[in-house]
Amino acid sequence: MDTSSTPATARDEVEALLARMDVVEPLVNAVCTVHPDALGQADRLDREAAEGRSRGPLHGRAVLVKDNVDTHDLPTTAGSLALADAPPPAHDATLVARLREAGMVVLGKTNLSEWANIRDEGSASGWSAYGGLTRNPYALNRSAGGSSSGSGAAVAAGLASYAIGTETDGSITCPAAFNGCVGIKPTVGTVPTEGVVPISASQDSPGPMARTVRDAAALLSVLAGDGRDLASHAVEGRLAGKRIGVPRSTYWGYSPHADAAAERAVALLAAQGAVVVDATDLPELGEEVWDDELLVLLAEFRSGVADYLATRSGGVPRTLDELVRFNREHAGTELAHFGQSLFERALEGPRAGDVAHRQARARSAEAARAAIDGVLREHDLDALVTPSYAPANPIDLVNPESFPGSCSGPTAVAGYPLLTVPTELAAGLPVAVSFWGTAGSEATLVEVAHGYEVARDATTGPLPEPTYEPFV
């Protein structure tokens, strides 16, 4: 179901989406909360439009918001039963306030990997104790990715043209790739994180998920609120002459399916006049970078989650230690499929601001930024392109998930943007490419990604719609 075209009225769109949820939600379980006043919102916005008071290009359009982003009129749980019975947050997150100011209908909240996948090393993506298990619309036995699982699956399933995800390392990129939609992880700081359940002040970055690059760019313009019209960069003719590097070492080679699709994408880029510069490899980022990253995330989560919980009313846990205790006391539900090893490690490690934390952050960020900026500068590149992820892995609530490789690590640690676009189906499952850039290069990435998307559509057509196969 293509929901990207502009509907006649907001009510028309919301009615159609609610009807589609009745059919599709039992299969994919992407939406954990539907707004009870969605039609009322739509009617009010339709009246404004009829009176000539449109708030902008997304006036009256419906958006789904990940359930770790505060909404004053809906629960915000991060997927945890610890927050399930709490009153809604007192205020909207800043980014939600911007959605409403732009005239968007907040249709509901999407399920996620609980606590945005920071709870356990053996977690199952797409599962939360509050929202249950989200499934991939292309194959119901396959993962919807994490942690913005519901947002990616909802866009793919036609439950909304627009959704909000959050990324710390791969949490927009992975579900975009697995579910065959567009995802943009902006430069850290582009979209405010006030009112977003945190993992890391250094790496958290909310961003848009949508069916097309132009739609994602339009939504990012609303979220960023900095006056840029990023959708205006999603026009033809901007790809020719762009210099695009192909860093094959490490970020290619882990999936024949993803590699083959990415090779065809690179050929399309070249055919459209982009200058493809091959073998533009990044310096090897050793295990110490990823060890430092995890130390930083756990230290910042320990402090940040306590600060966030202090904003919530009701009898909720107030510290990470209390969350750990809550999970143990509710082990039959919260710990039914995996534990909380990362929570426990966070309690044993340094706090944010400790010397060990500051040193780890400085080392890892410097290494990642130097690697990306160095190769961009050396070869005079506008962007890099790599496969995003292997096709979605089978859902497994017993054994740890298998991820043979991914593209998100360097940009996550650097705080740089990453734009993911589907390419084709491989063995019935979506695969994607991701375009990397330096800080603040979202407009350039939109130009490149839109140019690729147009070339893809002209050659093979848009990605086929999901068919909800029981097994692939």
Image (cartoon, helix red, strand yellow):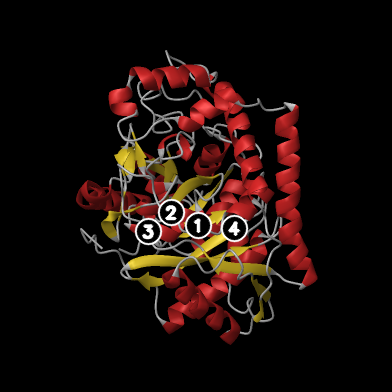
Secondary structure of the residue carrying numbered label 1: strand
Labelled disc at residue 183: 1
User: What kind of element bears circle 3?
Assistant: loop
The local crowd at label 3, few if under 14, some if 14 to 19, many if 20 or more residues have their Cα within 10 Å, is many
Q: Earlier in the sequence, mark 3 or mark 2?
A: 2
Residue at which label 4 appears: 418
The residue to which callout 2 is attached is 175
Whether residue 249 is visible to the viewer of this picture, yes or no, is: yes
Instruction: Identify which amino acid the numbered label 3 is placed on.
Output: Ala
CB contact under 8 Å: marks 4 and 2:
no
Label 1 Cα crowd, 10 Å radius (few <14 / some 14-19 / many 20+): many
Q: CA–CA distance between discs 3 and 2?
A: 9 Å
Residue 91 to residue 325: above or below: below
Seen at 66% across and 73% down, the residue is 245
Q: Amino acid at mark 1?
A: Gly
Q: Earlier in the sequence, mark 4 or mark 3?
A: 3
Q: Position of residue 342 (x, y in %)?
A: 50, 32
Q: What crowding class fits label 2: few (fewer than 14 Cα within 10 Å), some (14-19), or many (20 or more)? A: many
The residue singled out by tag 3 in the image is 392
State the residue in front, 387 or 304: 387
Rendered residue at 31%/57% (across/down): 157
Closest to the camera, between mark 3 and mark 2, is 3
Q: Are marks 1 and 2 in contact (CB under 8 Å)?
A: yes
**Which quarter of the rendering shows the N terminus?**
bottom left
Is residue 74 found left or right of 292 in the rendered image?
Answer: left
Which of the labelled discs sits on residue 442, or is there none? Answer: none
User: How far apart are the alpha carbons under marks 1 and 4?
Assistant: 8 Å
